[in-house]
Amino acid sequence: MKFMTSFLFTALFSLMIFNTASAQSLKSNMKSTQTLLKQIASTASSPSSNSDNAQNAAKMVTFFTAARAQSPDSGNFKDYQALMDQSIDLMKNLEAAFKNNDNTQALELLQKLNVAKKEGHDKYK
């Protein structure tokens, strides 16, 4: 019963976040993601924060999924979506790394996300 309650809460919370992300502007979605990324980065090496970091990584996926459908100010939209897909995959892997208590992999994925962030900002901001 506890598992079902937890599952339902997570599903409803995810739906609520997705609806919020879908209604936000691209800039707001990116700002929300940046806030979560900073929270994760500040505690990524601490195994005691893995559960919270996994949840924050899942939230980042939600914001990026919504942002993927939004048009950037500049650049090729198809290339933008490809970079967003790459970033979403990295975020999903980051969530899995935290769930598996693999902080070394999580730190490597954070570095890759920062590279993708810089590339995205250089091309589409």
Image (spheres, rainbow, N blue to C red):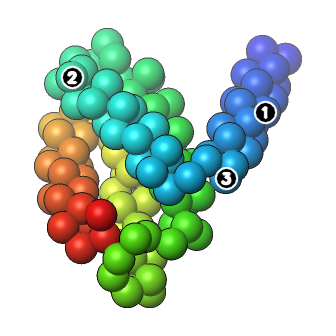
The quadrant of the rendering that contains the C terminus is bottom left
SS at circle 3: helix
Which residue type carries mark 1? Answer: Leu
Which residue type carries mark 3? Answer: Ser
Callout 2–callout 1 Cβ contact below 8 Å: no
Image position, residue 119 (x, y; %):
19, 67
Residue 22: assigned label:
3
**Distance from label 3 to label 2 (Cα)?**
27 Å
Q: Could you tell whether 60 is left or right of 125 in the image?
A: right
* Relative height, residue 67 to residue 10 (above, below): below
Q: Which residue is mark 2?
A: 42
Residue farthest toward the front in the current orientation of the protein: 73
In primary-sequence order, the first of circles 1 and 3 is: 1
**Distance from label 2 to label 1 (Cα)?**
27 Å
In primary-sequence order, the first of circles 3 and 2 is: 3
**Distance from label 1 to label 3 (Cα)?**
15 Å
Comparing 52 with 35, the one in front is: 35
Q: Which residue is mark 1?
A: 12
